[in-house]
Amino acid sequence: RLAENEYHKRIIYTSYIDLCQLYRATARPTECRETVDRVLGENPGIDTEWSGYLLRFEKAKALVALQDIDGAKAILEEILRTDNGRFKEQARVLLRRRP
């Protein structure tokens, strides 16, 4: 077995993000939410990495599709509190769009 490196992680996490986008595009937000929960649960170190933020964005969008606006807002507000970069601005933009 090969040791994981950044290249492998990028491939793996990008695939999870793509899978979540596919689930949302095919009107399967429940599967998207479950995938994000599983990936974040199995990989607690990615919470503050690029992949963790992107997965949480996917989950927030899935929650909106599931009519869980409060859950989506909570995720976006947490991103606002924990990130100081580009993800913070993306969360701010998404929060402005929501009721």
Image (spheres, rainbow, N blue to C red):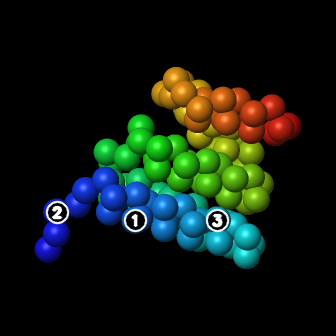
Q: Position of residue 75 (x, y in %)?
A: 59, 40
User: From the viewer's perspective, is 69 left or right of 1?
Assistant: right
Q: Dot 1 corresponds to which residue?
A: 12
Residue plotted at (74% across, 45% down)? 69
**Residue 21, which numbered label?**
3
How far, Cα to Cα, is label 3 from label 2? 28 Å
Looking at the rendered structure, the kind of residue marked 2 is Ala
Relative to 2, residue 96 above or below: above
Residue plotted at (41% across, 38% down)? 48
Looking at the rendered structure, the kind of residue marked 3 is Gln
Looking at the rendered structure, the kind of residue marked 1 is Ile
Check contact, mark 1 vs mark 2: CB within 8 A: no
Q: Dot 2 corresponds to which residue?
A: 3
Q: Position of residue 42 (x, y in %)?
A: 33, 58
Check contact, mark 1 vs mark 3: CB within 8 A: no
Mark 3: secondary structure: helix
Which mark is nearer the camera, 3 or 2?
2
Image quarter where the C terminus lies is top right
How far, Cα to Cα, is label 1 from label 3? 15 Å
Mark 1: secondary structure: helix
